[in-house]
Amino acid sequence: MLGLNLPVVIVLAAIGGVLAWRRANTLTWLLYTWVALWAFFKYGFAVPIPQSVATIYLGITGLALVCFASSSRERLSETVQPIVRLILEPRYRLALAGLLVALPALAAYNVYADLNVPLEAPGFGREVHPPPPTEMTVHDETVDMATAENPYLHYKHDDPELYGEHLENGRRVYYENCFWCHGDGMGGDGMFAHGLNPVPSNFNDVGTLPILQSSFVHWRIAKGAPGLPGAGTPWDSMMPAWEKFLTTEEMWDVNLFIYDFNGYEPRALGQH
Amino acid sequence: MTLHATRRAQAMATVAAAALLLALPAGAQVDLGTEEQRAAGKVVYDKYCGQCHGDTGDGNGYATPRVKPKPRDFTTGTYKFRTTPNGMLPTDDDLRRVIEIGAPYTSMPGWPNLTSAEIQNVIYYIKSFSPDFENPDRYGEPIEIPRPLESTEESIARGRVVYEEQGCAACHGEVGRGDGPSAPTLVNDKGDPIKVADLTQRWTYRGGATKEDIYRTFSTGLNGTPMPSYADSLEIEDRQHLVNYVYSLGDGDEPNYGTLITAVYSEEPIDLQDGETLDALFEAAPTTRFPLVGQITEPGRNFFPSVTSIEAQAVYNRDEIAFRVRWHDLRADTSGRNSPSLEVPMWDEDNGIGDDAGDDGGDSDDFFGDFGGEEAPAEDDFFGDSGGDDFFGDGGDDFFGAADAGPPGAEFSDAVALQFPASLAPEGTPELKPYFLYGDSQNPVDLWFVNLTYGVADTFRGRGSESIEPTEADIVEAVTSYDQGEWTVTYKRRRSSRAGVSFAEQQYTPLAFSVWDGFNRERGNKRALSSWFYVYTEPSVQAATTFPIVRAAVIVLVLELLVVFLVRRRARQKAAGEEAAGTTLATTEAPAV
C-alpha cells in the first residue's frame, strides 16, 4: 500500500546498478542522486506528492550533496575534475559548445512550459476518513460510536436465514438508492460518478470497508456529506444523508449488504 | 473498443463463413449451453444482474422504477443492439458486446471484470428466460458491415440527402439534436416514453459510437423501439454515406468534460440586445463542457435527468461580466411554471409515466399503474398523464381526472440557473464553499435563475433547499433563444456587487449549474445539476511571455561563460606559475571562446 509506481523505481535502481558496475566517478554519482530523486518524486508515486513538498526535499538533497562534495579537499577536486577537463581539453570542445547552448535552451524551455500549463481549477486535499463524532443521534436514537455495531451482523452465524433476509433488504435499498454513484458492482463508478467531485467511494477497495468499523459506516450513511467535519469538504460531496430517506433498519441492512457483497468484514471494535 | 470491434468482426466473419460454406440450416445456431453452464450463469446473474433485470428475468428488479430506459425484459426476446435483421434475436457476440461495455448513459454498466467464461455462462442463462431462443425461426444471419468509406465532402453531402429522404429528421431533428417533431411523442413497445438519440453527442450512443456501430444501428434497427431498420430501403453505399453524415454531426468522440471556464477580457461593451456583436464577443471565448447528473441527494430526486451536459463560456469588460450557457433539449417548454423551490411530491421521483412495473405495491406505483397498464397508452394519454395540473391544484380535484386535461407537457417550463457563493471564502480557507445544493445556513449561494417561459433572470439567495428566497440586490439580465434543439441563455451582471460575489481579475470563483427540462417534469429539486466548478477571470492585460523566457536563457548563459572563464584563467595562472617554477607540463592553452 506504498502506492509506488514500480516500473519507475525499477528503472532508477537499474541505472544506479549500471553506474556502480561502470564505476562512475563522483560527479556522475552526485548528479545521478539528485536527478533520480527528482524523477522519483515526480513519477515514482501512484499519487504524486505535492510540488511544494518535493521542491523542499530536492533543495535539502542538493545542499547535502554540495556539503558532501566539499567535505574534503580531495573529494572536491575529484568532483570538480571532470568539469575542469571538459572546459580545458580541446578534444571536448564540441561537447562544451553543445552544453553551453543546451543549458540555456533547457532553462528557456522550462520557463516556457511553466507559462503554458493549461489553467486548472484549484484543487484541495480532503481527508477521506476524518474522525467521526463520539456519538450521534439517528431517528431520535443515540448511537455511541465507540460501542455501536451492526445489530444484524451476528445473525451470520446465529441465524443464517434471518441474516439472508436482512441482506436481501440491504440489496433492495442499495439498488433503489446507491448504485447511481457507487456503481452496480460497487466500484465507485456508477452512471453519475463522472459528474462528482469528490468521486464516490469504491467499496471493492481493500482500503475502504475493511479498515472501517460498522459504526463509522453507519455514521457516513446516516449523516452523509453534511455530517462531515470541514476537513472532509462536506460542501463538495454529493453523499446524501440517508436518515432523510431510510429507516434505521434499512441503513444497517445496506451497511451489511455492502460488506457482504464484497466479501469483507467490518473492522472489529477496539481494533485500531 | 477497436479491439472489441475487430473481435466482433472476426467472430461475425467466422459465423457468416461457416453458415455460407456448410450451408447449415439457421437452426444450427441454437446453442443454449449445458445445464452446468446455465447454473454457473445463474450465480453470476443473481449477484450482478437480477437487481435490475429481475430475479426472473422480467425486467422488474429493485432499480426498475427509478431508471430510464428500463432494464431489458429478458422474457420477451426483444433486444436492441444486434447485428441480426430487424425483429431477430441477437447473436451471442452481440450480447457479449453489451455486457462487456454496457450501454453508455443508461444504468446498464459494462462488466469488464467478468471473465469471458462467466459472460458466456450468463448469456446462456439469459437466453433461458425466453422460449424464443429455442425457436430456429427467430435466428437471422448477421449482416455484413463494410469498411467505412472515406469521409469526403461529397460523401457527407450525399449522406445528408439520404438523411432527409429517409425522414431521420422527423425524429432526430434537422441537425441531429434529437428534437424532431415526433421526438416528444415516441414510446417503445411497452408504452414507455423513449428519448431519441442526440446524434451530435456521440458519446451517449447506447449501442456504440464507431462508424461500424452507426451502420449497424440503422441497418438492423433497435427492436422494441421506434428506431427503424433501413436495411430494405437503402443501398449499401448510401448507408455508408449516411454513416459519414451522421458521424459528421458529432461534437467529437469524447465529451472532454472540463472543470473551469476562462472568462476572457474585452474592451467592447456587452450589449445583450445586439446579437451579432454578442456572438462575436463569445466567439473569442473558450467553451467548456460540464457534466450534469440527476439531483439525488435531497428529496425531490431526479433519477433520470434529460440533460447530461452543458456548455459554458464567459467574457468580461471593465464593468460587466457575461456568461453564456448552451444545452440540448428535445423541445422548448415555455408555457408552464418553474422555480428552484417548487415542491416535488415523493411519487414523482419514480419512473411513473406509462409504468408497467406497478404491481409490486406502493401507492406511487399504483398511481401510475392505473395510467400505464399493460398496453401502450396512446400518445395523448401519455401527455395527459404528465399534465397532472389538477393534482397540484390546491382545489384537491381528483388527479386521475388529469388524463384529459391541458395541452401536452404544459405543466412545467424549461429553466436554467447559475449558482455562485454569496461571498468568497475568507483568507486562508480557499477550499471552503457553500454546500453545493443551494448552499447552507452559514454559507449562502446566489442563484441566477431563468424560467424560459419568461426569459428573464430572477435572483435567489439559497441557504439550503428549504430556504430559497428571492433577492433584488443585484440586477442580472438575460437573453434566451431556442434553435433546433438547443437552448442558449446569456447572462450579464455588473462585476462588482455589494451583496453577492464580485468578479475581480485573476480570481477563481466557484460556480455550479442546474438545468430543468419541463418535458421531463423537472422543477424544484428535481433537476440536473453539477458539482462546484470554477470561472477564472483571465488578466485583462496579458503578461508578455517572450521576456521571461529570454531572461532565463541569458542568465544561464552568462553563468556558464563565467564558470568557463574562471576555470580557464585559473588554469593559465597555474600553468604560468608552474613554468616559473621550471616545471614542464603539457597544459593545453585555453582557446578563446
Image (cartoon, rainbow, N blue to C red):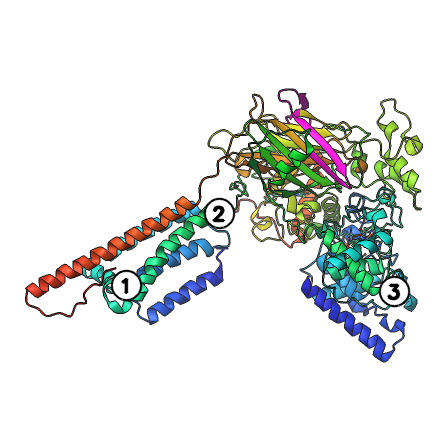
Q: Is residue A73 visible?
A: yes
Locate residue A113 relative to residue B151 in the image: left or right. Answer: left
CA gap between label 3 and label 2 equals 59 Å
**A78 above or below A131?**
below
**Residue underneath mark 1:** A26
Q: Quadrant of residue B438?
A: top right
The residue lying at 80 percent from left, 72 percent from top is: B15
Residue B178 lies, in percent from the top left, at: 79, 46
- What's the magenta region? B460-489
Tag 1 secondary structure: helix
CA gap between label 2 and label 1 equals 36 Å
Residue A110 lies, in percent from the top left, at: 42, 51
**Residue underneath mark 2:** A116
Q: Quadrant of residue B218?
A: bottom right
Discs 3, 2: same chain: no
> What label sits on residue B133 in the rendered view?
3
Residue B61 lies, in percent from the top left, at: 80, 49
Q: Quadrant of residue A83?
A: bottom left
